[in-house]
Image (cartoon, helix red, strand yellow):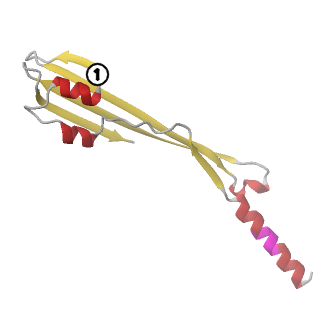
């Protein structure tokens, strides 16, 4: 083998390997915007001042309305989302004539519980946010 042939073969092999290591990942759902975030809750809710009408305007109707043992009205907002990304990774599979599927999922949960007094003003609230 000549040096020119060996260099050409090495260069071609390097190009093939680098082209085969590309990957493609895409998000399967567009992100949804919501006004119901921890930042908005902390910024807009003021105990003893914010009313049911204010909350309805900010966040819309709650998912659940109940009364506690003191007969105070309790509103619960619950949001859950899952983001999935999928694609393929050619990697070393180019030598075997295939690709490998790649998938990733992340889940977020958000709960806001608001307790109103007899005048429909916020007495207390709690916020629970988790991502996994």
- Magenta region's main secondary structure? helix
Furthest residue to the right? 1
Q: Nearer the viewer, residue 18 or 52?
A: 52
Relative to residue 69, is residue 57 depicted above or below?
Answer: below
Give the side of residue 132 with respect to residue 118, left or right: right
Q: Does 11 appear in magenta?
A: yes
Residue 8 figure quarter: bottom right
Can I make out residue 102 in this image?
no
Q: Which residue is mark 1?
A: 61
Relative to residue 52, is residue 128 depicted above or below?
Answer: below
Few, some or many residues within 10 Å of mark 1 (<14, 14–19, 20+): some
Relative to residue 60, is residue 99 depicted above or below?
Answer: below
Q: Does 5 appear in magenta?
A: no
Q: Nearer the viewer, residue 41 or 80?
A: 41
Q: In x, y percent, where is residue 20?
A: 72, 58
Give the side of residue 126 with respect to residue 107, left or right: left
Q: How many marks?
A: 1
* SS under mark 1: loop
Q: Nearer the viewer, residue 114 or 36?
A: 36
Give the side of residue 19 with respect to residue 51, left or right: right
Relative to residue 10, is residue 119 depicted above or below?
Answer: above
Residue 11 figure quarter: bottom right
Name which residue lies at 10% across and 15% down: 71
Q: In x, y percent, where is residue 47?
A: 10, 34
Q: Quadrant of the C terminus?
A: top left
Q: In x, y percent, where is residue 18?
A: 71, 64
Q: Quadrant of the N terminus?
A: bottom right
Name which residue lies at 58% across and 45% down: 26
The boundaries of the magenta stretch are: 10-14
Name which residue lies at 89% across and 78% down: 5
């Amino acid at each position: 083998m000549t040096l020119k042939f060996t260099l050409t073969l090495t260069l071609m092999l390097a190009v093939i390997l680098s082209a085969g290591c590309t990957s493609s990942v895409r998000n399967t759902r567009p992100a949804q915007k919501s006004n119901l975030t921890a930042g908005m809750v902390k910024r807009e809710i003021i105990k003893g001042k914010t009313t049911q009408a204010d909350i309805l305007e900010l966040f819309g109707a709650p998912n659940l309305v109940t009364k506690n043992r003191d007969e105070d009205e309790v509103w619960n907002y619950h949001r859950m989302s899952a983001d999935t990304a999928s694609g393929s990774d050619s990697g070393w599979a180019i030598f075997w004539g295939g690709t490998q599927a790649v998938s990733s999922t992340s889940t977020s949960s958000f709960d806001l519980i608001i307790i109103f007094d007899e005048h429909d003003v916020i007495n207390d609230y709690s916020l629970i946010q988790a991502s996994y």
